[in-house]
Amino acid sequence: MHLNHLNKGILSMSENYDYLTGLYNRMGMYDVWKNVISKEEYVQVLFVDLDNFKTVNDMFGHKAGDMTLIRVAEILKVATPDPGVAIRLGGDEFVIMLPGKKEQEELKELADQMMFLVRNEAKKERSFEIISVSMGIVRNAKVKDDIDQLLSYSDAAMYFAKESGKNQYIFFDDYAEKIRLEWRMESTAEEALKSGRFKVLYYPVMHLQNARLLRTNSMVVWETEDGRLWNRTDFEHVLDKSGLIEKIDLFLFEQICKDFAALDAADSRRTVMGIRLSKLLLDEEAASILNGLVSKYQVPKERIELLLDEKMLGRRGADRLIRILNQLKAEGFSIGLVQFGSDFSSIRYLDSLPVSTVYFDSEYIDTN
C-alpha cells in the first residue's frame, strides 16, 4: 500500500498531515521515519522547492498560491513510487523519501518526471508559467544516519540548484566538498570578523569615452588564514542564513565612512562612493543606523550611493525593503540597483523604486 494513502494507526493522526495539501507534515515525516523508513537499510531523500513562488502570490494573490501548492502536492504524490512518501515541510518546501537502495539513473528519471509534470501545468494554469522546481538529492543514505542531517544535506544541494540557475536538480555527493566548506565558513565567520579578516577594497567606475572617474565602488572580502580572498558572492548566501551578513554590512559601511574621512583630509577631489548592502537594508532601523555613522564621520550623504542586488526584490519582504529604501532616499542617500537583468524580479517594482542608477548584469549584456 502506498504510504501517502495510509489511513490507519499512528500515521493517520490528523496532526501528522498538512492542513492545505493533505501530505504528511514535518511531524508526520518523523512518524514515517520511525515506523516505516527505519526498517530499511537505505533511503533516498529529495528536497523539493518551488522557484519564484513568491511572485505567484504577488501577481495572482494568496488563494492562487494555495491552489498552486495543492496542485504541486498532487503531482508529487502521484509521481512518488511505492513505497515512497511525499511531505510538505512548510511554505513551498517539500520532501520525497524513498526507502531502499536506488541507482542514480532511477532518481534522475523521477526528478525529470516531476519537473516535467510541473512545467506541463503551465498549459492549464497561468501561475505555473512562473514557477519551476529546484531539487537537492541525497542518494543511498544509511537509515541509521540522523534524519535532520540528511535533510540539511538535501536542502544544501537544493540551494546549489537554485544558485546555479533554478529549474534543475543536484546530487549532494557532487557538491559535498563545497557544501562542507560553506558550513565551515558559517562556523568561523564571526571570529573572522572580530579578528579583522574581513577587508574593504575599492575599484573605480570610469566613463568609457573620456576616462573620467564617475564614482568609486567598494567591495568586502574575507581573507582566509591561507591567504585566499573570498568575495561577497562566495559567502553572502552562507552568512545570510545565520544573520551575520547584517554585521558584515555594518562593518563595510562604517569602514567606508572612516576611509572617506581620511580621504577628505588628504585629497580635495570629490567622488561618489557605491556601497553594496543586503540584510542591513531590511532593518527597520537602517535609516537611523546609517545616519548615525555618516554624522559620526562627517560624510556628506550625497556622496554615498547604497547599492542593492536586484534579487533582493524577489525575496519575502520586498514591500518592506522598498519602504525602507524610500525612507533612505528621503534622508538624502542615493540608491542604485545592481545585477539588473539577472532575474528581473525588480520589474513590477520599478515605478516605486527610488533608484538613481541601474547597473546591468554583465551576463545579460553579453547575451542581449
Image (cartoon, rainbow, N blue to C red):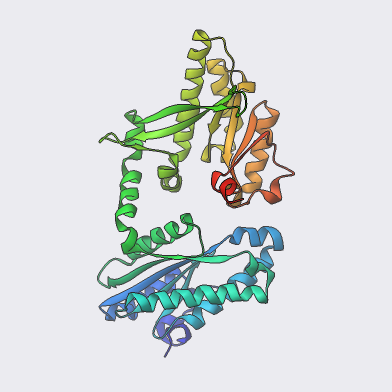
- In front: 306, or 287? 306
Q: Where is residue 266 shown, x and y percent of the image?
A: 49, 9
Query: In this view, which residue lies farthest toward the right?
Result: 351
Query: In this view, which residue lies farthest toward the front?
Result: 209
The tally of labels here is: 0
In the displayed structure, does residue 139 sit left or right of residue 314?
left
Residue 23 seen in the current view: no
Residue 265 seen in the current view: yes
Q: Where is residue 324 shown, x and y percent of the image?
A: 64, 38
Q: For the point 70% across and 37% down, which residue is it?
A: 354
Point out the image quarter for the N terminus. Answer: bottom left
In the displayed structure, does residue 202 sit left or right of residue 338?
left
Q: Is residue 185 above or below residue 261?
A: below
Q: For the point 29% across and 79% down, which residue is it?
A: 101
Q: For the point 52% across and 10% down, which residue is it?
A: 267
- In front: 130, or 286? 130
Q: Where is residue 28 shown, x and y percent of the image?
A: 43, 74
Q: Is residue 141 above or below residue 239?
A: below
- In front: 367, or 138? 367
Q: Quadrant of residue 295?
A: top right
Q: Quadrant of residue 231?
A: top left
Q: For the point 63% across and 64% down, which residue is it?
A: 130
Q: Where is residue 69 shown, x and y percent of the image?
A: 59, 70
